[in-house]
Image (tube, rainbow, N blue to C red):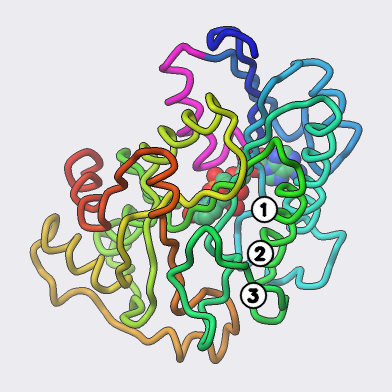
């Protein structure tokens, strides 16, 4: 294996919410040579484009952040294997897996808690060894494409899948940040009711970056969960957040996910969330509780 400073990492999805943040953190460590082609330079859904980038950058590791991540627009493509969700998420993961197998490149693929249904009889939170949902009718289309991608990646012994969900970082970015968005909607007078009966976990980006580095350095294979050490609900989280940043707890509006799922079936897992105890043990880490993640958001991002 090359010395750490000579290790070449090719990163897809580098302009995205998570990819861009992870790249800044990886670059700050000065330990790796990073190649971050744009989708027009490397379209993961095009086999030839993947092959050209692998030849050009000669990576020993690929981190795949590339995805069609918007679950609402993905749902409009249900069943369409020519749609961008299937192409970016499934075909992309297959192309990367194939290239990595051929050139003995270590592949780290980012996946989602949405590969689980959270339904009655199959409730989360889910451990790393739980089998993801096998019925596409019990998942969102986005979740199903991520599920199919995982199957492709994990067939390669020199690869790992890292599942995350409800991502937040210590920089205020209200667009996609799970916690930041709640505060932003509240501050702009646009807050809508949050679910009081949905179980979720949080992924804190600094913990994700540290885990990725460890996985890459040791080239660990298998499935990993980077998630808060315990479960919460959107309402519980928002009330805790607001009691810290805007001490007016009554402002958090409540709704039931059951009613929402009547009109948007399978869009989100009701009893979802990821258990990360096995990952913490294997990496020798202790991930924060959801409250400590909110505390970090409040301390650094507000
Ligand atoms: N954000 C979350 O809360 C969350 C939760 C669970 C899992 N994840 C997973 O985390 C990963 C990163 O998500 P994110 O939130 O950073 O998503 P994002 O902000 O939407 O970024 C996705 C990236 O993928 C690129 N991309 C899309 N199609 C591509 C293609 N065919 N070839 C190459 N690049 C392509 C996008 O480029 P353009 O912008 O130019 O299209 C963008 O840079 C994804 O695997 C997602 O499923 C995210």
Point out which mark residue 139 bears: 3
User: Which quadrant would the N terminus be assigned to in this image?
Assistant: top right
Task: Find disc 2 in the rendering and name its residue.
Answer: 142
Is the C-beta of the residue carrying label 2 under 8 Å from the nearest atom of ligand 1?
yes
Mark 3 sits near ligand 1, with its Cβ under 8 Å away: no
Q: Give the number of the disc on residue 40.
A: none
Q: Are marks 1 and 2 in contact (CB under 8 Å)?
A: yes
Q: Residue 42 or 95: which is nearer the viewer?
A: 95
Residue 72 falls in image quadrant = bottom right
Q: Earlier in the sequence, mark 3 or mark 1?
A: 1
Q: Secondary structure at mark 1?
A: loop
Task: Determine which residue is flagged by label 1.
Answer: 68
In the rendered structure, which disc, 1 or 2, sits on the residue that comes first in sequence?
Answer: 1
Name the residue furthest right. Answer: 48
Local packing at callout 1 (Cα closer than 10 Å; few below 14, some 14-19, many 20+) is many
Q: Quadrant of the C terminus?
A: top left
Q: Position of residue 241 (x, y in %)?
A: 19, 60
Mark 1 to mark 2 CA distance (whole Å): 8 Å
Quote the CA–CA distance across marks 3 and 1. Answer: 16 Å
Residue 129: x %, y % from top left = 55, 61
Query: Does the magenta stretch mainly form a helix, a strand or a loop?
Result: helix
């Amino acid at each position: 294996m090359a010395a750490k400073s000579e290790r070449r990492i090719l990163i897809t999805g580098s302009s995205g919410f998570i990819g861009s943040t992870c790249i800044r953190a990886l670059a700050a460590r000065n330990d790796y040579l990073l190649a971050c082609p744009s989708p027009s330079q490397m379209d993961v859904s095009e086999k030839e484009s993947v092959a050209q980038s692998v030849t050009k950058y000669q990576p020993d590791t690929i981190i795949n952040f590339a995805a069609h991540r918007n679950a609402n627009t993905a749902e409009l493509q249900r069943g369409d294997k020519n749609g961008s969700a299937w192409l970016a998420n499934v075909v992309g993961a297959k192309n990367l897996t194939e290239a990595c197998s051929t050139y003995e490149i270590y592949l780290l693929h980012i996946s989602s808690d949405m590969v689980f249904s959270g339904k009655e009889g199959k409730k989360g939170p889910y451990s790393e060894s739980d089998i993801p949902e096998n019925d596409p009718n019990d998942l969102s289309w986005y979740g199903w494409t991520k599920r199919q991608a995982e199957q492709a990646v994990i067939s390669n012994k020199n690869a790992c899948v890292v599942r995350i969900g409800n991502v937040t970082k210590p920089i205020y970015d209200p667009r996609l940040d799970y916690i930041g968005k709640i505060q932003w909607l509240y501050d702009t007078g646009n807050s809508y009711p949050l679910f009081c009966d949905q179980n979720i976990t949080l992924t804190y980006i600094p913990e994700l970056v540290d885990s990725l580095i460890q996985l890459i350095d040791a080239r660990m294979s298998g499935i990993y969960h980077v998630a808060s050490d315990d479960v919460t609900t959107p309402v519980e989280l928002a009330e805790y957040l607001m009691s810290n940043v805007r001490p007016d707890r009554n402002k958090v509006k409540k709704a039931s996910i059951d009613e929402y799922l009547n009109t948007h079936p399978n869009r989100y897992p009701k009893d979802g969330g990821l258990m990360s105890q096995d990952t913490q043990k294997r990496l020798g880490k202790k991930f924060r509780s959801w409250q400590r993640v909110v505390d970090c958001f409040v301390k650094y991002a507000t």
